[in-house]
Amino acid sequence: MAYYDILLPVPAGGVYTYISHTPLSRGQRVRVPLASRILTGVVLNEAKELKDGVKYREIAETFEDSTLFTDQFLKLIDAMADYYVNPPGLTLSGTISKSVVESEPCPVPVKKLAAAENLRLNPDQQAVYESIAADHGKFSVHLIHGVTGSGKTEIYIELAKDAIAAGQKVIYLVPEISLTPQMVERISNRLGFEVPSYHSRHTPKKRKEVFWSFAKGEAPVLIGARSALFVPAENIGLIIVDEEHEQSYKQEEAPSYQLRDMAVLYGSILGTTVVLGSATPSLETMHNARAGKYRLHRLLTRHAACMPAMQTVDMKSCDPIDHIISERLYDELSATVQRGEQAILLINRKGYSHTLYCEKCGKTIHCPNCSVALTWYKSRNVTKCHYCASEYRTPHCTHCGSTLTRDYGAGTERVAEVLEQLLGIPVLKLDTDNVTSQSKLSKMLDDFRDGKFKVLVGTQLVAKGLHFPNVTLSAVLNLDNMFSLPDFRAHERAFQLLVQLSGRSGRCEKEGKVIIQTYSPEMEIFDMAMNRPDDFYEFEMQRREAFGYPPVGKLCRLVFSHSREETVHETAQEVKRALASMPSALKVMGPTQAPVYKIRNKYRYSILLKSPDAALLKRAIHLAVTSFNKLGKTAVIMKVDRDPYFFM
DNA sequence: AGCACGCCGACT
DNA sequence: GTCGGCGTGCTC
């Protein structure tokens, strides 16, 4: 008989000790009783010490299969919990889904494809490939900074082939797997077998099959979004993070984490190669590359076509059609369509309009549960809250009940409507609200590729990695509103968006054009995106240094929420008071009402911690967490968001 | 997270 | 008089 520490997916704490009559090994799955339920957990180790006054219970059941979780995987969970100052139980439950952990092994055989396509790397690609391959078998992080179309994927594939040949497994991370069925197909063809992909839009059965095929089966490669990093497997030899700058790698829901950073952390635990790739690397990653922590490789040539011509249109000095589309853009659009080519238009707003207001009382129409304006979807005649997802039939005023409403500003629906009238052709709309399923999205993208639509209007989704050979015009209708968000990364995001968008047009033989409509064409960011992208890093770093923002300083955001406003405010104040004992180098800002100060009827206050170094920040977070726990206000939630990306 | 325990308002 | 609201606290 022995005692074992078991990690359970419970948000508070997570490590409990149980009695076992048979010897257990680290990483094994077990079923144990906790209070009145039975949970599946992971064996960590034999208990080092026993506590007085605890009546230990017995393990209920062990699983037939051998160890699932590797030692390194458990070390990753531990290191994540430590870095983000979250309980390990929360970290575990936030990384592996319960249904998958509890499932019986069901790996499926790898489907071989017709002879793998072979492709020769060009000399630039070859040099980068060889340089990275030379580090194989030890921990090293590489950044491939390559313009769109420079062929980063081919390098990933060659590196993956080497790892497979050495009997190792490869994790290939992409930001939006749902957008990339074409990419999965392409990679599969190159590797000569069907590469399984792992993402939330799969059915539960499919998810389990993919999980087990990589964890215990013969699949040597797994492509997936965030969750793919957390499929435990023996002998992982390479981790690829494509489009490393993408903000969707940041998980917002507790336990929040930055997946790119976790990939690097995992690489250091595994002692393996991590490859990050982007045409527009994040400031954090560039900073690490400049500091010598990551090795920087540059790919500057675009093999198929030269970069498109980019230009701004000053919206102040023209009279845009319906306040949406400048003559200039309209002319380019119709010329593009007449040539039988295609265009992608980006508008930063979902739904029909920007804001709905009441004609009777003049107030903006808000969500009853959240402090945000409702978005009107004209096509379905509903208003919707983007925070709590509630929908209301027939727009009506939330203050006086009147159904007399007016709207202003344009969203994807309105832009599509205006364009359909102007051009007399159907326009394809793409945003996260009308893309409800994987198959629907695939069909929409296929329709566009086949030329059934000449014009695609969408939110930021459209700037991300889509590849359409016939697109020669892309345009941003308005992104000025990005700069008014409370977000120190606004410039970085705008720059990345513009450069990525320019990569969408004219990817093949045809010449491409990019048009940016703006009320502030004088802003330096436009000139940099258009003419001197290499200057952006220095430019932005100056601003970050001046304000002590990342990657120079380190941030942590504490978000408090509760149904009573005074309770949240008081709790946040108490935590702030506790932080007063920290050295003055640690800046404590707030508590202030969060920009969206109410979500689902919970009031929100936030404190921002800013520190010149990571160690001091961590001490401060620990102090905040312990003093918050001491308050014992379990109804108030404090979310710890280290290295925050969203400030709403 | 669940789930039980515990102390205050509108019902058979 | 009880049912049930959800605030609070614990689970090896």
Image (cartoon, coloured by chain):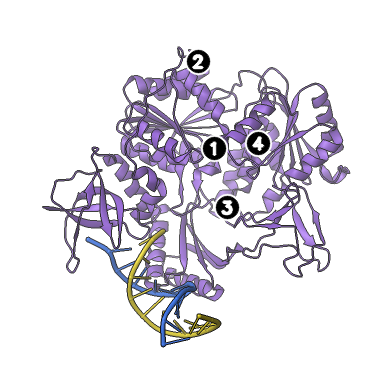
Chain colours: A purple, B yellow, C blue
Nearest-to-viewer mark from 4 and 3: 4
Task: Kindly state the secondary structure of the residue where label 1 is placed.
Answer: loop
Would residue A419 appear left or right of A115 to someone viewing this image? Answer: right
User: Does residue A260 show up?
Assistant: no
Which disc, if any, is residue A546? 3
Q: Residue furthest left?
A: A1
To which residue does mark 4 refer?
Answer: A462
Badge 3: few (under 14), some or many (20 or more) residues near its Cα, within 10 Å? few
Which kind of residue does numbered mark 3 sit on?
Ala
Letter of the chain that mark 1 sits on in the rendering: A
Q: How far from the left and from the top, in percent, is residue A46?
A: 17, 51
Residue visible at 41% across and 43% down in the picture:
A262
| Farthest residue, direction right | A319
Res. A176 mark? 1
Residue A317 % position (x, y): 87, 44
Residue topped by disc 2:
A121
